[in-house]
Image: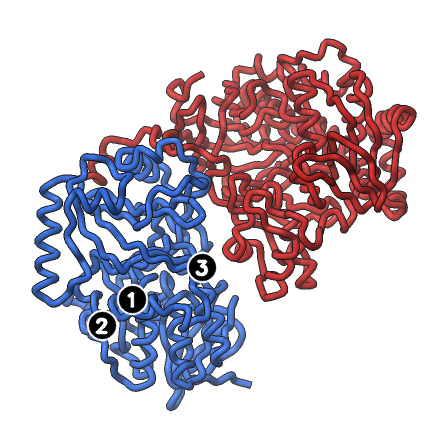
């Protein structure tokens, strides 16, 4: 017997699970088809930054709406997701960099956005006492923070199921075809029929887009992270750099997560990544210079999650350009975790009603049609 | 030896300086392969021949003839032309055959055309109530101190568990003039019944006579108590050992229930592993030459499944012969057939020992508040509860409870966590699987990592 649903969501990461939850809250019956298990890849093993700071202009409205959900995350999913809000600080390493940050903050003000705030050296020192003396200031987004990525993804998954969504894990999508009024999604455990389909397949989403005849230039990338043993607390906000690749945060348990986007070599068909130690060494040097207090820290683990990167650095969101009833939600390019709650709400609105209140004009899949980019 | 003296690449990189690694390095280097052996310890020998080249124990009878057999292997490796580097910690290996190694606080990446992992075995976790108390240690730990420093335990010493190493350690302590209050034997009658069918093979194996003599020697001098419910008791350090309700005063409790392959490096390198139901552990999937399905990576010695030191050396030779044949088809090298035959003879009695010393379920799958993950202080009850709630594998368990995420990288809890999940979910350990392990497989400092040389071109591309 063919299984049926209101919506088939392909991919059980934070985006698939968030959309499933919000669809279920609207009274629809979604089925999530996940080839491994929920949170196995980027959603479960990312750095956990919940960041509005330094986003592409097109992403800001979505990011702000997502932040509102983060601040009430326990009401939404029944778990605090380890969310702590101590801000994100973008540190300037010299005066020229600080001047360019000021231009950006001024530009945001003109557009009516106040979440990014320029800070001088004294405020930087107050927020991040451990930072090296050579840094003249920076930008802070005070509502930002960090959460536990796997726990968050699981919380969305669990709440979605409680509200009526169905999870099929260890199940692979093998085909997509329009049959009359519905989509027939072929899977390794038989077909599912539904009027709507959401492609939230992350680093594998291009394969779904191919099935729909709208290929996308998705790059499979695996940003590397490493974590130290427990250190005495010395820093509260998440710290990021712009010139050199670095993101840096100390979790509540004292461990310090060091990231920044140097990529490992991904093997997406084997669910495997091979780390690039020379690049991790560069991150280690940056930390060495910026935070002298870290020099004796021990690295206990390094890893990389497999993600989809788009050439213009922003995700693919919205309706398919070829297939009525199909929607895309992928390509978050290393910064999709914070967007998870809000994007799920927006996508559920779009799938259920045909339109959304959040501006997503710049994200359409049509931008990759030949001649557009 | 300093990292800057290392070549950027070698024909063969051998990791681990026990019998398998020594034999592999010697065989390969003699056949003309540019070979380096990285050994973490200050002297070669591995665990079984620990400190063989610099042992302070003068009376050879204390450690026994089997131990001193290791010096021949050490000499062979030393004279073979292989570069043997002690104090070298390998913290990473991947399928590009790149090895991350640290020597004296400095790190380097070295690549090999072939890799032989010979990282041996480690002691099976022995999670009982109170096993984290000061005064409780593993038998292997005590033996390390005895071999490397010639130190014999003082105070009231109780040994508990099962397996050849436990009895060997007991004999070594007694020969060195130490005292043992009691040995708690956790073996069961059922084990004897299961082992009996393998007895004929065992009678022919070299272990038979040696083992029997050893047991007789220990039983003549020490009190043996059967027991399966064991707890270490004490508030801030061990004061008593509880054996099925009976209290034995003790200052030192030495635990041991067999050894299992040290799989961390091979797992991190992507070598597939499978559950071995007789040895109750994960072993790498290998062919007859001990080559894995990751091209260029072989696993020799006890890391390929427990078979003891003599077998380990033969496995090392077989793996090295395969490397030589692949890289230098014209090299003069012995046919591996002779080594295979010696290996088969060594492995003959193994099934009997595996069954006889099979650790009981109660001591592998703890309950309640007993700590399972020592690094993150996760209890058996927490793991069982999380498995019942739907957690299907150790990797999700890591994310939920952080077990296995501490500096030991699951060495002290991995098998226990797998078995507990299988127990709660009514499935097999093979189905549940093992931790996915992430490098560095041995912790390195931020400073060490920063010391890796990075090519100028790469630095310019990344920095402003």
Q: Which residue is mark 3?
A: A150
How far separated are the C-alphas under marks 3 and 1?
A: 18 Å
User: What percent of the width, then of the height, locates residue A267?
Assistant: 41, 52
Label at residue A67: 1
Crowd class of label 2 (few under 14; some 14 to 19; many from 20; radius 10 Å): some
State which chain disc 1 sits on.
A
B352 shown above or below A41 = above
Q: Which residue is mark 2?
A: A364
Depth check, front residue: A100 or B190: A100
Q: Which chain is blue?
A: A
Horizontal side of residue A164 vs A345, given as left or right? right
Residue closer to the observer: B443 or B24: B443
Which sits earlier in the primary sequence, circle 2 or circle 3?
A: 3
Viewer can see residue A215: yes
Direction from residue B41 to residue A214 in the image, left or right: left
Residue shown at 71%/45% (left/top)?
B129
Q: Secondary structure at mark 2?
A: loop
Cα gap from disc 2 to disc 3, whole angstroms: 28 Å
Looking at the rendered image, the quarter that the N terminus of chain B falls into is: top left
The subunit letter for the residue under badge 3 reads: A
């Amino acid at each position: 017997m063919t299984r049926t649903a209101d919506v088939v969501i392909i991919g059980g990461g934070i985006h698939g699970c968030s959309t499933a939850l919000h669809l279920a809250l609207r009274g629809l019956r979604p089925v999530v088809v996940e080839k491994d298990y929920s949170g196995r890849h980027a959603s479960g093993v990312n750095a956990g930054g919940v960041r509005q700071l330094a986003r592409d202009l097109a992403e800001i409205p979505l990011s702000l709406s997502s932040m509102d959900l983060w601040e009430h995350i326990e009401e939404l999913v029944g778990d605090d997701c380890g969310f702590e809000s101590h801000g994100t600080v973008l540190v300037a390493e010299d005066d020229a960099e600080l001047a360019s940050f000021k231009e950006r903050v001024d530009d945001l003000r003109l557009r009516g956005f106040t979440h990014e705030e320029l800070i001088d050296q004294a405020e930087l020192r107050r927020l991040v006492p451990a930072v090296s003396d050579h840094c003249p200031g920076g930008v802070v987004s005070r509502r930002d923070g960090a959460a536990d990525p796997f726990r968050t993804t699981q919380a969305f998954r669990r709440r979605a199921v409680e509200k009526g969504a169905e999870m099929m894990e260890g199940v692979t999508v093998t085909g997509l075809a329009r049959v009359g009024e519905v989509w027939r999604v072929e899977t390794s455990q038989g077909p599912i029929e539904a009027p709507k389909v959401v492609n939230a397949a992350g680093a594998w989403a291009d394969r779904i887009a191919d099935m729909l005849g709208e290929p996308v230039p998705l790059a499979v990338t695996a940003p590397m992270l490493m974590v130290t043993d427990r250190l005495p607390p010395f820093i509260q906000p998440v710290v990021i750099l712009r010139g050199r690749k670095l993101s840096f945060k100390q979790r509540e348990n004292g461990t310090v997560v060091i990231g920044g986007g140097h990529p490992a070599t991904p093997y997406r068909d084997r669910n495997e990544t091979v780390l690039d130690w020379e690049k991790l060494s560069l991150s280690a040097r940056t930390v060495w210079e910026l935070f002298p207090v870290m020099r004796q820290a021990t690295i206990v683990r390094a890893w990389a999650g497999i993600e989809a990167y788009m050439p213009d650095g922003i995700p693919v969101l919205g309706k398919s350009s070829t297939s009525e009833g199909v929607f895309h939600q992928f390509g978050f390019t290393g910064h999709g975790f914070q967007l998870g709650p809000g994007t799920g709400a927006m996508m559920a609105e779009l799938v259920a009603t045909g339109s959304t209140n959040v501006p997503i004009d710049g994200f359409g899949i049509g931008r990759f049609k030949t001649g557009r980019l | 030896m300093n990292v800057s003296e290392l070549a950027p690449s070698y024909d063969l990189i051998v990791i681990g300086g026990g019998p398998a690694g020594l034999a592999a390095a010697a065989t390969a280097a003699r056949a003309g392969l540019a070979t380096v052996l990285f050994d973490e310890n200050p002297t070669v020998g591995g665990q079984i021949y620990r400190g063989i080249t610099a042992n302070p124990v003068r009376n050879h009878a204390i450690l026994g003839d089997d131990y001193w057999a290791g010096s021949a292997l050490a000499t062979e490796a030393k004279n073979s032309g292989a570069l043997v580097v002690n104090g070298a910690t390998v913290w990473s290996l991947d399928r590009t055959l790149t090895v991350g190694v640290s020597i004296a606080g400095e790190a380097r990446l070295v690549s090999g055309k072939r890799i032989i992992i010979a990282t041996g075995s480690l002691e099976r976790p022995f999670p009982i109530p109170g096993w984290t108390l000061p005064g409780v240690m593993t038998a292997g730990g005590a033996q390390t101190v005895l071999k490397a420093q010639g130190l014999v335990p003082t105070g009231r010493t109780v040994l508990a568990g099962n397996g050849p190493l436990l009895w060997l350690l007991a004999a070594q302590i007694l020969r060195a003039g130490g005292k043992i209050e009691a040995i708690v034997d956790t073996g069961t009658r059922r084990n004897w019944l299961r082992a009996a069918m393998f007895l004929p093979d065992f009678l022919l194996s070299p272990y038979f006579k040696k083992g029997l003599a050893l047991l007789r020697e220990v039983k003549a001098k020490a009190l043996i108590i059967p027991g399966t419910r064991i707890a270490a008791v004490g508030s801030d350090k061990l004061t008593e050992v509880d054996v099925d309700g009976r209290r034995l005063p003790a200052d030192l409790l030495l635990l041991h229930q067999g050894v299992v392959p040290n799989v961390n490096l091979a797992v991190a390198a992507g070598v597939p592993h499978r559950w071995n139901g007789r040895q109750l552990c994960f072993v790498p999937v290998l062919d007859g030459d001990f080559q894995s399905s990751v091209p260029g990576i072989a696993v020799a010695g006890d890391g390929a499944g427990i078979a003891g030191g003599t077998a380990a050396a033969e496995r090392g030779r077989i793996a090295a012969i395969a490397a030589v044949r692949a890289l230098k088809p014209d090299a003069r090298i012995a046919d591996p057939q002779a080594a295979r035959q010696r290996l088969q003879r060594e492995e003959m009695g193994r099934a009997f020992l595996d069954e006889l010393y099979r650790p009981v379920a109660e001591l592998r799958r703890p309950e309640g508040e007993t700590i399972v993950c020592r690094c993150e202080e996760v209890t058996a009850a927490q793991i069982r509860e999380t498995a019942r709630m739907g957690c299907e594998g150790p990797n999700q368990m890591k994310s939920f409870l952080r077990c296995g995420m501490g500096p030991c990288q699951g060495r002290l809890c991995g098998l226990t966590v797998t078995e507990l999940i299988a127990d709660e979910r009514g499935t097999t350990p093979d189905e549940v699987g093992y931790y996915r392990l992430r490098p560095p497989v041995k912790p390195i400092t931020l400073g060490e990592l920063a010391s890796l040389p990075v090519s100028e071109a790469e630095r310019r591309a990344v920095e402003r």
